[in-house]
């Protein structure tokens, strides 16, 4: 028998015991390390990533901004088609304007441009109330202000696309929350229309007043626009009756073939002015007189009738909606679109 006690070897032999002890000690340290603190702050923290998970807890001093927070804090008094005045938030109102004024199938950047233009137009109306509706900021008549449609009516019109289109317009409004179009620090008259014949129209041609940011620019839409080319036919008697009712001084006593003179045209082919019975009218006046879709037209006479061949739709000043959509399809942002159609303007917060 020796002085060393003989034992049956265990799982760990005598030579491994120090190693195991150190390993257990390191494991314990690593386990409890996250719980150790210095001056109330963890000594070890998981590295933060740039994006947060949906259920992450934000720092207590962080400001949370919800969609359309600025628009939801602004009120709009709207005179509806039935004559009532209702108060809506700017976000609610703009949803109805975008839904009424622009096809919801358009590109989202075009819808954002429309929301921004409509918001700017609304602010200018609020700053300069109309005598036509003194008890309301704005009305839903597009011939006076801008069109508006109730959400229920819009969704009924869209049918199976209702949810998709409604959410798309919500994103367009929220994505431009509080933004408008400014020139020299002031909201502009953000005029818009449906489609141009290659170029927009300088405001001076339509209303006689020159506006720095409402100049003629190229517009990329074309034959993809529904009813881009239209035709209107009037008998000689109809032309005579309509003309003399509006312009009694016109002389339509001669041959009908000579009633219209040679038109003066702008770069886009639109009529700047044209003689009718010795009275020189603007293209816009002729458009209004014969309810043409635009002032880009030619007129011919034959077999007792006048035929107007018309291109585009609308007054032609400011942003073309179909042009905006064409630009968006080519990759332009809503800011690109707005600063293109409103010369020298920029996009910034209105409030």
Image (tube, helix red, strand yellow):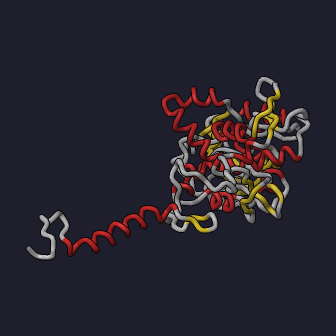
Residue appearing at x 28%, y 74% in the figure: 18
Q: From the top left corner, tell me how far across and down residue 96 is, in percent.
A: 68, 36
Q: Is residue 100 above or below residue 326?
A: above
Instruction: Please state which of residues 170 and 229 is positioned toward the viewer in this rendering.
Output: 170
Instruction: Please state which of residues 240 and 257 is positioned toward the viewer in this rendering.
Output: 240
Instruction: Please state which of residues 65 and 27 is positioned toward the viewer in this rendering.
Output: 27
Disc tally is 0
Residue 292 in view, yes or no: no
Q: From the top left corner, tell me how far across and down residue 64 is, in percent.
A: 67, 51
Instruction: Please state which of residues 342 and 9 is positioned toward the viewer in this rendering.
Output: 9
Residue appearing at x 49%, y 63% in the figure: 34
Q: Is residue 13 above or below residue 207?
A: below
Residue appearing at x 52%, y 49% in the figure: 54
Classify residue 194 as left or right of residue 212. left
Assign the N terminus to one quadrant of the image. bottom left
Q: From the top left corner, tell me how far across and down residue 266 is, in percent.
A: 70, 59
Residue appearing at x 60%, y 51% in the figure: 110
């Amino acid at each position: 028998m020796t002085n060393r006690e003989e034992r049956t070897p265990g799982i760990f032999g005598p030579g491994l015991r120090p190693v195991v002890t150190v390993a257990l000690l390191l494991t314990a340290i690593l386990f409890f390390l996250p719980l150790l603190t210095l001056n109330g702050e963890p000594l070890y923290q998981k590295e933060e990533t740039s994006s947060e998970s949906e259920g992450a807890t934000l720092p207590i001093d962080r400001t949370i901004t919800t969609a359309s927070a600025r628009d939801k804090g602004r009120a709009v008094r709207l005179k509806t088609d039935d004559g009532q005045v209702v108060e809506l938030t700017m976000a609610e109102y703009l949803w109805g304007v975008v839904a009424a004024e622009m096809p919801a199938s358009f590109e989202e950047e075009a819808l954002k441009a429309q929301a921004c233009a409509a918001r700017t137009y609304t602010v200018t109306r609020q700053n300069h109330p109309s005598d036509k509706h003194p008890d309301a900021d704005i009305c839903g008549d597009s011939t006076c202000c801008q069109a508006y449609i109730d959400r229920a009516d819009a969704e009924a019109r869209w049918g199976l696309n209702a949810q998709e289109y409604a959410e798309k317009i919500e994103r367009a409004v929220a994505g431009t929350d509080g933004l408008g179009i400014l020139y020299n620090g002031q909201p502009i008259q953000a005029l818009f229309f449906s489609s141009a014949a290659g170029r927009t129209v300088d405001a001076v041609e339509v209303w006689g007043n020159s506006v720095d940011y409402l100049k003629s620019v190229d517009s990329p839409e074309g034959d993809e626009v529904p009813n881009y080319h239209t035709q209107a036919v009037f008998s000689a008697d109809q032309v005579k009756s309509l003309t003399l009712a509006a312009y009694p001084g016109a002389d339509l006593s001669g041959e009908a073939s000579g009633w219209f003179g040679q038109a003066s045209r702008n770069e886009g082919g639109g009529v700047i002015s044209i003689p009718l019975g010795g009275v020189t009218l603007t293209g816009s006046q002729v458009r209004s007189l014969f309810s043409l879709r635009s002032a880009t037209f030619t007129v011919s006479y034959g077999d007792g009738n006048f035929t107007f061949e018309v291109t585009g739709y609308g007054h032609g000043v400011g942003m073309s909606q179909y042009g905006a959509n064409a630009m968006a399809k080519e990759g332009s942002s809503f800011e690109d679109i707005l600063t293109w159609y409103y010369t020298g303007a920029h996009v910034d917060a209105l409030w």
